Image (cartoon, rainbow, N blue to C red):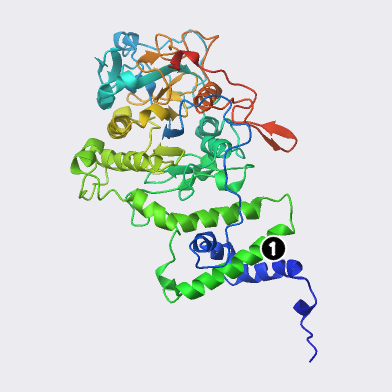
Amino acid sequence: MKNDSPFHRVPLARQALSRREFLWRSGGGLGGIALASLLGGEGMLGLAAQAAESGMRPGLPHYKPRAKRVIQLFMGGAASHLELFDYKPELIKRDGQKSDFGEHVEAFQDGLGPWMKPVWPFKPYGKSGKMLGETVSELGKIVDELAFIHNLVGKTGVHSQATYLQATGFQLPGFPGMGAWVSYGLGSMNENLPTFVVLPDHRGFASNGPKNWDSAFLPGQHAGTIIYPGRETPIADLFPGKAGEYVGPKSEAAAHAVLAKLNREHAATREGDARLEARIRSYELAARMQLAAPEAMDISKEPDSMLELYGIKKNPPTWPKEINAEEEMDYFGRKCLAARRLVERGVRFVQIWSGNDNGFPRRNWDSHEDVRRDHGPLSMGFAKGASALIQDLKQRGLLEDTIILWTTEFGRMPSSQGGKGRDHNPYCFTNWLCGGGVKGGVTAGESDQWGYKPLERDHPTMVYDIHATVLRLLGIEHTKLTFRHNGVDRRLTDVHGEIIEDIIA
């Protein structure tokens, strides 16, 4: 009997595209391959995982690593160094007097009112005697572990561009996040969990949203995976929806096998295009995460003493609409505890965000109207969680090879705005680091008497220097971690970057 079907005469490799289109249109797509690698490894399918493991780049590490992993704390909206870490007696002395910067100042919102002293008093902490603002006094418990950099300078006072710069090393979209570069360079330490995890603010994203942790032109599997600790479903779409309960294990496994085969054949006809391979790897990771991620995110077995350390309420009340410190401690503490659980299970880069880009009254650090209202709860929340995280990592022996990096997109002006707020200050702000080869109890780089610009204006610190230093501690020479894109060897530090030797132990 004659077979007139066109597929009878077309090689299978050429059939793959039309079948793939059919599967997309019928709701299947790439999602069907999710369990193929996992089930093959368990002998439930006759398929073995064909994707190569991400692995470390050839030639790495360039140096003996001091650290294996990074936890970055990012304060979205521009936290005021003047209220938190950078003590300026001159501002207290001149409070309320007309501000005079000795030069023309182009302010973002004309926030050039009188000098304004810190909203909260400062006190010395630790053997180093580091002065800290009252709302971050929890950091006093671990302040001798921290290395402060008070002369950081940005390039712009626009939130979106400045956030890109700190997160990716560039002011424009289209560049990989720092965690994506670390993932690309060093690969995974646990094939069952993502290499790069992002814990956003529970109220929403900061400026640019997921573009801050995108893989851009790097292979797609290096992008950050978003997790929301404390939610009923911390990872979106990891498990099938309730509407799909009619699908049984056997039919699901059979569908995975067919779709995995078709997608591999489709990829085989397109050498040099890594997009499908990256998606296949991502879905295979998702399958493995179905077993590993719920355990990693389950804090129910943590002792009460640990929850108390992080400021987590075992049965949190319904928080009022107005922002408050207990709420911030609970939410930020959950993210910090989740970060500890993730890094001890092999996640290499965790990024924790505080502050979102929408809503009013403000739920971020962009305190144009009222520093006390905005910075108070947020700073108490982050300080409690960060202090607990560092103490916890240290007692587990993990701090010695884990870098903690605190940052924000820029600082705030020493002059007042509207009496109670502060305008943007890209000319000077603070970062601090600890752990993983960082020298504690030191300050590298000072600001001037106002906290307006670096004290030594010819020798500021820039984000490239921070990134270069973190990469060095991870065993990477920042000038050699590159990716060819559009004819250019791109890197995290662009064409800049100097190691901050003063903070390396």
Q: Residues within 10 Å of mark 1 (few under 14, many from 20)?
A: some
Q: Which residue is mark 1?
A: 265
201 or 432, which lies in front? Answer: 432
The residue drawn where x is 44% and y is 38% is 351
Find residue 322 and report its horizontal and vertical position in percent. Answer: 27, 42
Question: Is 411 left, or right, of 16 in this rendering?
Answer: left
Q: Give the percent coordinates (x, y) of residue 58.
A: 63, 35
- Relative to 479, is 271 on the left or the right? right
Viewer-nearest residue: 69 or 55: 55
From this viewpoint, is residue 357 visible?
yes
Q: Nearer the viewer, residue 17 or 130?
A: 17
Residue 144 spot, x, y in % from top left: 31, 18
Identify the residue at the far bottom of this view.
1
Residue 415 visible somewhere in the drawing = no
Q: Considering the numbered disc 1 on the image, is that residue within a helix, a strand or a loop?
A: helix
The quadrant where residue 279 appears: bottom right
Question: Vertically, is 220 above or below 496?
Answer: below
Where the C terminus falls, by quadrant?
top left
Q: Is residue 86 left or right of residue 260?
A: left
- Type of amino acid at the residue the image marks with label 1: Glu
x and y percentages locating residue 76 in the rendered image: 43, 35
